[in-house]
Amino acid sequence: MVYEDKNNKRRFGHVSFSDNSGLSVDDAIKITGAQSSFDGVGAEYEYIQMRFGEKGRDWTLKLQALVEDGEKVFDRLDLVLIKEKKEISLFFDISDFFGRF
């Protein structure tokens, strides 16, 4: 179930997403509430499907990479948006759950 809480955070079950665009490290989508790295990465893909549609039909993943910037850790996903015929990079701040198994 996806809904917005009183702080305008997008939520998927117990995981929250900030309202940032995700189009740069400085505006990365912060994920909170994930119990593990597996849980958090799964939430990333749920978020992408919520925002861009079905994988394989509406978008494809070109690259996924870990980006470290000081004390913060980010997941960078390069997507190809099929209908728009364009590529974008989406950044998630995964510092809250990175390395937790």
Image: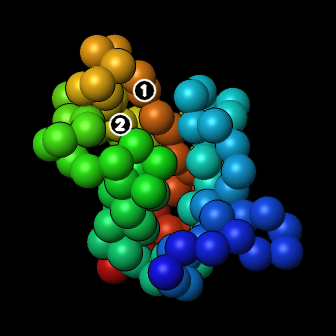
Vertical arrangement, residue 14 with respect to residue 73, above or below: below
Residue at 24% from the left image edge and 26% from the top image edge:
82
* Label 2 neighbour load within 10 Å: few <14, some 14-19, many 20+: many
In which quadrant will I find the C terminus?
bottom left
Q: Quadrant of residue 27?
A: top right
The reply to whether dot 2 and dot 1 touch (C-beta < 8 Å) is: yes
Vertical arrangement, residue 9 with respect to residue 27, above or below: below
- Would you name the residue on which mark 2 appears? 77
Is residue 36 something that shows in the picture?
yes
- In the picture as drawn, the residue positioned furthest to the left comes out as 56
Residue at 64% from the left image edge and 64% from the top image edge:
10
Q: SS for tag 2?
A: strand
Q: Is residue 50 left or right of residue 5?
A: left
- In the picture as drawn, the residue positioned furthest to the front comes out as 83
> Where is residue 96 shown, x and y percent of the image?
58, 66
> What is the CA distance from the residue labelled 2 to the residue labelled 1?
6 Å
Q: Is residue 66 left or right of residue 74?
A: left
Q: Quadrant of residue 8?
A: bottom right
Between disc 2 and disc 1, whose residue precedes? 2
Vertical arrangement, residue 58 with respect to residue 96, above or below: above
Q: For residue 20, which numbered disc appears in the image?
A: none
- Would you name the residue on which mark 1 appears? 89
Q: Amino acid at mark 2?
A: Leu
* Label 1 neighbour load within 10 Å: few <14, some 14-19, many 20+: some
Residue at 55% from the left image edge and 84% from the top image edge:
14
Q: Amino acid at mark 1?
A: Ser
Residue at 69% from the left image edge and 31% from the top image edge:
26
Q: Nearer the viewer, residue 38 or 58?
A: 58
